[in-house]
């Protein structure tokens, strides 16, 4: 699966197998309280399964300023 | 994972409430939290003329959407800060949001009002941190514009994380004056002051972000290129770290401060609120900070029409 992290420095990650959203965040060391995970414009929940061929994006919800 | 209300598929998990909701019940929960904030602090009445300060970011657009859904008929107010592409994109985002919903968006442009200067240039010229001049200018024009156009309430999109981060910052430096004033409502303390409210103060950034995605509200999620915000982001991340291991901490920290902590701090400044000798807006000085800035920049201030 392709994971696009839409947080500077905008890294992309490739995983060779399907995983739960929870697990993906853990792998990438992201705090679930600080991000939202989106697939095809739909919000994913921590328990949602992401297939091997899916593409998802992760957005920060923390705003600065 | 099932919705605790309808047992349908849950879309969002809220560990701080030990809850899980489907889309419909999350929206219901979200609106209830906003209604509760409004009621607890007597923020708004249905016949108030409300101006929502919008930036194109998730929080302010979500606030505009919810207030509209709850029947407060709010207008939007966008300030073009003259920060290159970022400002252009932000304005377009607000415009298309307003257009789609048939809402009124008012705009003013800082470069037009301040001799062609944007925030970056103003910051450079005055050698002040961009966010500090930006905050000062925004606050001034929110109030000034609302007063001119006879709005009696300004609503801003500050969420629980913003408020908790501010609280932590004020506490670490024991800013007792700020602590006594930090509130979801800033009342009309002066004839030239418009009441300000923060109806999203019970909701986290994760919740406002989720609400925006669920309701398909397009928003700008890139950061402002001038965001210095390192410190406020550090506080937010620290609070989220605590939240991760101990859900509910952030809410308790902030909401209990309002209930049990705040009254312990005394405010010495508000008592000295007078009118600026140049522009008439409320200030604790003789000439307000905004007029000082204008003077330093040597620009002619344009009067709002
Ligand atoms: S990040 Fe700073 S300069 Fe940019 S809009 Fe926010 S307050 Fe203004
Ligand atoms: Zn439900
Ligand atoms: Zn003044």
Image (spheres, coloured by chain):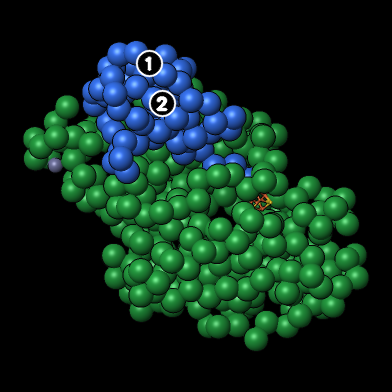
Chain colours: A blue, B green
Q: Position of residue A64 (x, y in %)?
A: 59, 42
Label 2: how many Cα within 10 Å (few below 14, some 14–19, many 20+): many
How far apart marks 1 and 2 lie (CA) works out to 8 Å
Q: Do pointers 1 and 2 mark residues of a single chain?
A: yes
In the displayed structure image, the side of residue B199 where residue A18 appears, left or right: left
At x 34%, y 22%, the residue is A1
In the displayed structure image, the side of residue B237 where residue B267 appears, left or right: right
At x 18%, y 40%, the residue is B22
State whether residue B256 is above or below residue B218. Answer: above
Q: How many marks?
A: 2
Residue nearer the viewer, B199 or B132: B132
At x 66%, y 71%, the residue is B109
Q: Position of residue B52 (x, y in %)?
A: 48, 66
Kindly tell me whether residue B144 is visible in this rendering. yes
Q: Residue furthest left?
A: B7
The residue singled out by tag 1 in the image is A15
């Amino acid at each position: 699966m392709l994971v696009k992290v839409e947080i500077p420095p905008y890294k992309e990650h490739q995983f060779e197998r399907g995983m739960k959203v929870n697990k993906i965040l853990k792998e990438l060391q992201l705090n679930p309280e600080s991000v939202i995970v989106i697939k095809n414009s739909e919000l994913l929940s921590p328990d949602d399964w992401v297939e091997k061929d899916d593409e998802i994006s992760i957005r920060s919800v923390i705003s600065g300023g | 994972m099932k919705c605790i209300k309808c047992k349908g598929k849950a879309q969002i998990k809220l560990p701080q409430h030990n809850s899980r909701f489907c889309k419909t019940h999350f929206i219901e929960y979200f609106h209830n939290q906003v209604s509760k904030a409004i009621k607890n602090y007597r923020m708004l009445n249905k016949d108030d003329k409300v101006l929502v300060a919008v930036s194109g970011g998730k929080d302010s657009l979500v606030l505009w959407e919810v207030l509209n859904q709850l029947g407060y008929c709010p207008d939007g107010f966008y300030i073009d800060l003259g920060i290159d592409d970022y400002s252009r994109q932000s304005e377009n985002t607000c415009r298309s949001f307003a257009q789609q919903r048939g809402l009124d968006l008012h705009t003013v442009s800082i470069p037009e009002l301040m001799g062609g200067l944007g925030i970056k240039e103003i910051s450079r010229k005055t050698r002040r941190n961009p966010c500090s001049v930006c905050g000062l200018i925004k606050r001034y024009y929110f109030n000034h514009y609302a007063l001119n156009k006879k709005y009696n309430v300004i609503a801003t999109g500050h969420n629980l994380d913003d408020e908790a981060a501010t609280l932590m910052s004020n506490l670490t430096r024991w800013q007792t004056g700020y602590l006594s004033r930090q509130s979801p409502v800033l009342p009309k303390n002066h004839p030239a002051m418009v009441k300000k409210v923060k109806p999203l103060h019970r909701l986290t950034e994760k919740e406002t972000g989720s609400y925006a995605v669920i309701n398909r509200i397009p928003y700008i999620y890139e950061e402002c290129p001038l965001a210095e915000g390192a410190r406020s982001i550090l506080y937010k991340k620290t609070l989220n770290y605590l939240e991760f291991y101990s859900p509910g901490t952030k809410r308790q920290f902030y909401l209990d401060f309002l209930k049990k902590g705040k009254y312990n701090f005394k405010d010495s400044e508000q008592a000295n609120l007078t009118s600026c000798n140049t522009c008439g807006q409320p200030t604790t000085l003789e000439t307000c900070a905004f007029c000082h800035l204008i003077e330093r920049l040597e620009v002619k201030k344009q009067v709002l029409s």
